[in-house]
Amino acid sequence: MRVYLETERLILRRFTESDEDHLFALHNDREVMRYLNGGQPTPREVIVERTLPRFVAGGFFAALEKPSGAFLGWFHLRPAEHGSDEEPELGYRLHKAAWGRGVATEGSLALIDKAFAELGARRVFAQTMAVNLGSRRVMEKCGLRLVRTFHLEGFEAIEGSEHGEVEYELLRSGWEAARDRP
């Protein structure tokens, strides 16, 4: 297992083809997918032919619980489409069993630190639906600040999409200032 990053409770590792069943289960949980596609099921063919190859290619990390090795979900830290390596996007998707336990915050903080300390990021950002209060709280706990609300064009409307999307960011200067505080 190639470990990308380790935290107190998590191992983040690169995805492999053997993660098909993990992704299929996660991406077919209606509650997990509620703010992404309205909770619609994801066919296995989509996981096998599109999702998993993209995850294996890089920027996505399987989140495993220490010491059990249980698959909790995933995180990503990668440039947005047509974006800069200096401005990676942070994302996460976790099983409900991991919700409310600080797992999303723990994994996100570790990736944010890696982005600034090792990867030369000048800005880390994350986006979610405005109504996804749980995800917004994680972003805020990680030091990201709301920078804009916007509406996506050309996507099928799901419940809550009329309120738009939000983008949060943390600049290098903010990360450095937070590290210097006692």
Image: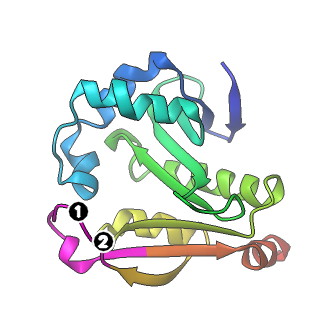
Q: Residue at x 43, y 29 (%)?
A: 52
Tell me how many marks there are. Answer: 2
Q: Which residues are magenta?
A: 151-166
Q: Which residue is mark 2?
A: 152
Choose top left, top right, bottom left or bottom right for residue 6. Answer: top right
- The question of residue 125 being in magenta is answered with no
Q: Which residue is mark 1?
A: 155
Q: Residue 90: percent from the left, percent from the top?
A: 55, 57
For mark 2, does the 10 Å Cα neighbourhood hold few (<14), some (14 to 19), or many (20 or more) residues? few
Residue type for callout 2? Leu
Q: Is residue 101 left or right of residue 145?
A: left
Q: Residue 95: percent from the left, percent from the top?
A: 36, 40
Is 86 in front, or is 115? 86
Q: Is residue 80 above or below residue 125?
A: above
Is 16 in front, or is 95? 16
Choose top left, top right, bottom left or bottom right for residue 38. Answer: bottom left
Residue 52 numbered mark, or none: none
Q: Is residue 38 left or right of residue 47?
A: left
| Residue 32 in view of the camera | yes
Q: Is residue 134 left or right of residue 1?
A: left
Is 148 in front, or is 174? 148
Q: Is residue 101 above or below residue 73?
A: below
Q: Check whether the beta carbons of the residues at disc 2 and disc 1 lie within 8 A of each other.
A: yes
Q: Residue 62: percent from the left, percent from the top?
A: 53, 33
SS class, disc 1: loop
Quarter in which the N terminus is drawn: top right
SS class, disc 2: loop
Q: Residue at x 50, y 35 (%)?
A: 55
